[in-house]
Image (spheres, rainbow, N blue to C red):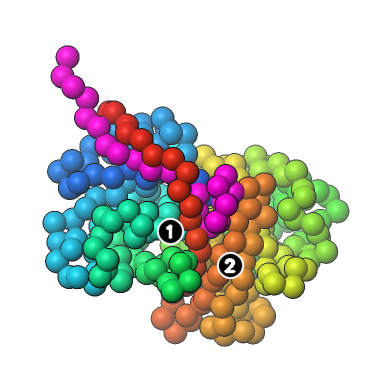
Amino acid sequence: MPAPNTAPYVVLDAFTQTPFKGNPAWIVLFPSSADVPSDETLHHIACEFGQDTAFVTLHPHANADLETATFGLRWFTPAVELKLCGHLTLATSSYLFQSGIVVKEVKQLRYETRAGILTAEKLADGKIELEFPGSGAAPVTHSVDIIIKAVKECLGHDVKVLSVNEGARDEFKRFALVEIDPSVDLGSIKAKPEVFAQFKQYELFIITKKSSVPSVDFESRVFGPNIGVDEDPVTGSAHCLLGPYWSDKLKVGSKPLNARQVSPRGGDLVVVWNKPKGTCLLRGNACPVAEGKISF
């Protein structure tokens, strides 16, 4: 029997500095594109881990420019391949900067992804800064009453819904964004995310409110039963819609906003909406928790 192929993997918790908080990110590293197995095998690896998994490929020109390193990057849940994923990209970037895979002169990481070229930089305070596409929100004009009913079934019938929106840009139209009354203690609710599975047109349901915590601008929880994630602990891509929404609502322009996702694990990030450019800067930390090797 031939020896199995193997690849190293690492696990980091993203959008936190505390182990076992934030969003766990499993990262598998391949030395070149020739070493990447089939899509079916990538899916099997994500299923084996039972977690969202990033697959990173070192490109031949990765260190040709001393200040920039380029990698291939794909993201899989146990159910689907994702078009965009913030926590996996942030954790990948943190690991690449810390591990010595890139030379110390490198200032920027570039990723070739399904969403196009994405970039990451390490800031002076140790945070990783991602530049992702962003989108404004547009009011939902269909099935609004049914969506509001589902939100109340998920969170509680006393929860007051203030608005029901979806992403305005094509790549965010499958994100529903629902603002609720700020008096709700969103983090303490035992949610029932399965009620959102009926809305096949949406990958994510993002529930948000203005925060009552002085150091936090807004809070959220994110549910994605249609992509195999009942509740996501901390969701970078959701903040590419949340950042523009709250920047416009709070009339702060390009001022950084402090965001907290109040899932059971919880996590924090800073969001900056660059409206003229149509991009969001996502800033956060990640901490390593495990490493190993997988056979396939």
Q: Amino acid at mark 2?
A: Leu
Q: Nearer the viewer, residue 10 or 132?
A: 10
Residue 73 lies, with reference to residue 256, above or below; the image says above
> Magenta segment range?
1-22
Q: Residue at x 69, y 72 (%)?
A: 215
Residue 20 highlighted magenta (yes or no): yes
Q: Secondary structure at mark 1?
A: helix
Which quadrant is the C terminus positioned in? top left
| Figure quadrant of residue 118 | bottom left
User: Mark 2 highlights which residue?
Assistant: 242
Q: Residue at x 25, y 60 (%)?
A: 102
Whole-percent x and y of residue 148? 73, 55
Q: Secondary structure at mark 2?
A: helix
User: Mark 1 highlights which residue?
Assistant: 90
Whole-percent x and y of residue 206? 62, 57
- 1 vs 2, front mark: 1
Q: Amino acid at mark 1?
A: Leu
Q: Left of 243 or right of it: where is 219?
A: right
Q: Residue at x 83, y 50 (%)?
A: 157
For the residues bearing labels 1 and 2, Cβ distance under 8 angstroms: no
* Residue 166 visible, this angle: no
